[in-house]
Amino acid sequence: MTQPKGLRQAVEVFEDFHSFDHRNVGAFDSRMRIPAAVWVSGPCKYVTYKSDKWNEGMHEYIHTVTSFPRVKMGLSVQRPGSQRIAVPKKIQEVEALTFIGRCTGYSYVDGDGEPVEATTSAQHEWYWSPSARALFVVQSKRTVKAVVWGGSLNVEPRGIVG
């Protein structure tokens, strides 16, 4: 069986980020696709997640986006004032993603300059594309609900940065 392009890099990012060996390589639903376009409501302010990184048990982390306002928050559903924009090809065509943790929420600034905070259910998880430098909220391993990209967004051993 041929490994997806970028799988080795995704595993390395997982191990660096969590500070332990990956337990398995999982598959998403075969119908899952990263959307060609999303509704961008505004720049992302922060993302929150629960993770057992550093093998210290589950903790909640908040990453405040330091390269705000260049980091875009793209959602799968239209919100008031959002604009439909194309997802860059390098983000749309990734073949391997790194699990970051359970998504507990995110915040963005809407078209009126007002902050919007969202929380998510237990079926939502954050994934990272090392090759495209984008975060994805994936529901139940089958539906991309949000895409975050731009600025100096990155995942490093210390956590999400940028």
Image (cartoon, grey):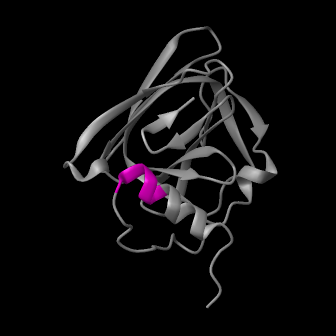
Of residues 91 and 12, the one nearer the viewer is 12
**Residue in view at x 66 percent, y 20 percent:** 81
Instruction: Indicate the quadrant where residue 134 lies.
Output: top right
Compared to residue 86, the image places residue 25 above or below, namely below
Compared to residue 151, the image places residue 20 above or below, namely below
Residue 59 relative to residue 145: left or right? left
Task: Give percent across and percent down for residue 102.
Answer: 35, 48
Report whether residue 52 is seen. no
Quarter of the image where the C terminus is located: top right
Task: Give percent across and percent down for residue 92.
Answer: 72, 54
Q: Which residues are magenta?
A: 14-19
The answer to whether residue 117 is magenta is no
Residue 14 relative to residue 44: left or right? left
Report whether residue 16 is seen. yes
Task: Give percent across and percent down for residue 73.
Answer: 61, 31
**Residue in view at x 62 percent, y 53 percent:** 130
Quarter of the image where the N terminus is located: bottom right
Of residues 12 and 32, the one nearer the viewer is 12
Task: Give percent across and percent down for residue 40.
Answer: 67, 30
**Residue in view at x 45 percent, y 45 percent:** 157
Compared to residue 9, the image places residue 62 above or below, namely above
**Residue in view at x 69 percent, y 49 percent:** 132
Compared to residue 23, the image places residue 48 above or below, namely above
Of residues 90 and 111, the one nearer the viewer is 90
In the picture as drawn, the residue positioned furthest to the bottom comes out as 1
The kind of secondary structure the magenta stretch mainly shows is helix
